[in-house]
Amino acid sequence: MGKGRAPCCAKVGLNKGSWTPEEDMRLIAYIQKYGHANWRALPKQAGLLRCGKSCRLRWINYLRPDLKRGNFTAEEEEAIIKLHGLLGNKWSKIASCLPGRTDNEIKNVWNTHLKKRVSPAGEERGAAGSKKKKKKKTTKAAAGGGAEAPLPLPSPSPSSSTTTTNFSSGDSGEQQSNNMSKEADDELDLENFEMMPMLDVDDPSFGFGTLVDTAPAPYGSAVSVSASAATSPCASSTSPPPASAPPGVDDLLVLPEIDMGHELWSIIDGDAAEAPAPRCQRNPAEPTNGADAGSHGAEGKEWWLEDLERELGLWGTVEDYQYPMGPQGLLVADHPDPLPAMVDDPVSCYFQAGPASAVLQELPGYPVPATAVTGSINQMGL
DNA sequence: AATTCGATCAACCGCTCACCG
DNA sequence: TCGGTGAGCGGTTGATCGAAT
């Protein structure tokens, strides 16, 4: 157990606080190339002055390609309320039922308004909450209002016209969330929780049962922002990445000299209005509701992918990669810093590091909808 | 226009779990 | 079986932003 735990950020002079675009880019680039088999070693290898924990969190909660971001739909909120009633503060489990949403995000949403909505005391506030504010969460208003009947405990009311959630397990009062034992947790007949339509994500294979077990499944040992496969992120999480990790890599990441703070994300976002050149048909309004992420045409994806990779300097061939990959990911024991150019000057050298990999897109098992990437990165507000 | 207050969210902290030797 | 290590989870906090005053 926790004994002998290595000191974290604070104790070893690592960076803390908000991530800079450079750090984000570095992390993304690194994971694209090598995956994240070892979070602890990742920051060092990627040249990040962060602890692995921090990197993991950043990736999971913010940079992961399949994140929906954007507002929670009324359906999602309702699902959260119901799931919370069933699972309690098992945010990760709840998150696993809401593809594209992170446990942290759900936790925040719950603590900031859903909880108030559910609790009698917060009922009024919920209504008052319509005064709303904030840039995001517009759906809240929609979900709010009178619909906020105190929801002591989610009873699997199929009455929810918007959700076909089917909770077959005890919806009885004793399902007091926080007191739920692990066993009780396991006993939940989650398999019968069929599937949540609004979660969909165009993944027919998405199922509650699977999610519960594989949960926030990491995106395999490697992730490609440019995967061309049509499969959804969910699918990738349920089907483990191929044992054979990406071929090796030996070149440095080559990132174009672009303005990280704004241009880059505009590019990634495919925002024709701001990007140097038109890149995709993506609907600018999309982020408001990620439910349709990944619903773009295949051809659009492809050229978007290619374009994006070129922009990021991620366009390359398999020959570019020669670092050996082992079952645990990259065999880094003696491989040089994959981003050596960044070491001396993390920022200025960042974009000059070598050709990065586009190879992952060739690999089966790393299907990441390009649109998901645009969606998530788009929300970075950079 | 300036200040205050409340809401939101990203990130950190500390713990537990799971795996491995 | 036990101890060490890394990953993951849940709670909490601090910074930021927008609305209200």
Image: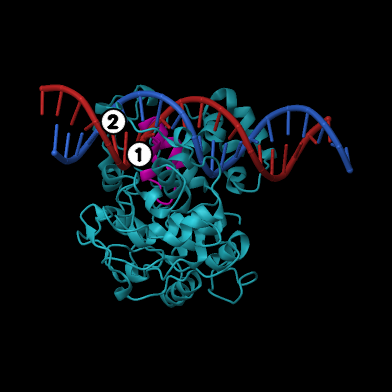
Chain colours: A cyan, B blue, C red
- Is residue A84 one of those drawn in magenta? yes
Span highlighted in magenta in the image = A78-102
Q: In which quarter of the image is residue A154?
A: top left
The reply to whether dot 2 and dot 1 touch (C-beta < 8 Å) is yes
Q: What element carries label 2?
A: helix
Please tell me which residue lies in front, A6 or A359: A6
Up-down: is A149 above or below A98? above
- Residue at 68% x, 42% y: name it: A133
- In the displayed structure, does residue A251 sit left or right of residue A286? left
* Rendered location of residue A214, percent (x, y): 28, 46
- In the displayed structure, does residue A56 sit left or right of residue A212? right
Mark 2–mark 1 distance (CA, rounded to whole Å): 10 Å
Up-down: is A33 above or below C3? below
Q: Is mark 1 on a helix, strand or loop?
A: helix
Up-down: is B21 above or below A352? above
- Residue at 52% x, 58% y: name it: A377
The answer to whether residue A237 is visible is yes
- In the displayed structure, does residue A274 sit left or right of residue A177? right
Q: Mark 1 points at which residue?
A: A93
* Amino acid type, residue under disc 1 in the picture: Lys
Q: Mark 2 points at which residue?
A: A185
- Residue at 50% x, 53% y: name it: A23
